[in-house]
Amino acid sequence: METNVVLVGFSGAGKSTLGKLTAPLLGLRFVDLDSYIEQKLQYKVPQLFSQFGELVFRKSEYDALQELLEDEGQLIAVGGGAPCYAQAMKLIVENSFSVYVKLSEEALVERLANSKKPRPLTKDLTHDDLETYVRETLKKRAPYYEQAHLIISAEDITPEDLAQAILAELPQ
Ligand code: S3P
């Protein structure tokens, strides 16, 4: 496939896991934006946040995304905040087939509470504070995610379901 597919959605929605398994079904290369940035800059995401601050990380996300979207044939999973800064969602919508991997607040809280990925924005939160964080941050971010070409409920979705939904909607 010559296009790019970009998965957006809140932290903990399963974009990377789902993306990695779905990409080969569509004949696409899987790219995880966080890992791509880590390789490019030789810093782990938590280090980027602590040493340079969130804004530098957001700029790195935008630059990496712009760079990747110059190529094609990729399924890119982007971090939960990536589409919500500067003109990143516009860049995604104009240069890829975008998919919002959507999960309920409750499911996101549970997934984040049990996840092993180091996430600077949620790592020190108690369960109550995590609930508040997810509720308030999702409210701000959903208007960006909802601009995606396809919105898919990811509650019990398989990679095959996602691949099929993308193929059904992808402009020929
Ligand atoms: C972030 C989400 C993370 C990562 C960074 C910031 C966010 O990716 O990019 O920690 O702002 O929500 P995931 O969506 O994979 O958790």
Image: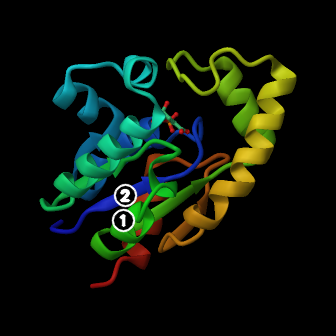
Q: Secondary structure at mark 1?
A: helix
- The amino acid pointed to by label 2 is Val
Total count of labels: 2
- The amino acid pointed to by label 1 is Ile
Q: Which residue is mark 2?
A: 6
Left-right relation of 7 to 103? left
Q: Position of residue 59 (x, y in %)?
A: 34, 45
Q: Secondary structure at mark 2?
A: strand
Occupied quadrant, residue 122: top right
Occupied quadrant, residue 41: top left
Residue ID at (27%, 26%):
38
Q: Residues within 10 Å of mark 1 (few under 14, many from 20)?
A: many
Q: What label does residue 51 carry, if any?
A: none
Residue ID at (22%, 54%):
74
Q: Position of residue 93 (x, y in %)?
A: 39, 72
Left-right relation of 66 to 131? left
Q: Position of residue 71 (x, y in %)?
A: 12, 59
Viewer-side residue, 100 vs 70: 70
Whether label 1 touches label 2, CB < 8 Å:
yes
- Residue lying farthest to the right in this orientation: 128
Q: Assess mark 2: CB under 8 A from ligand 1?
A: no
Viewer-side residue, 153 vs 37: 37
Residue ID at (31%, 68%):
96
Does residue 165 sit above or below 138 in this rendering? below
Q: Position of residue 140 (x, y in %)?
A: 69, 56
Does residue 54 sit above or below 71 in this rendering? above
Q: What label does residue 92 carry, if any?
A: 1
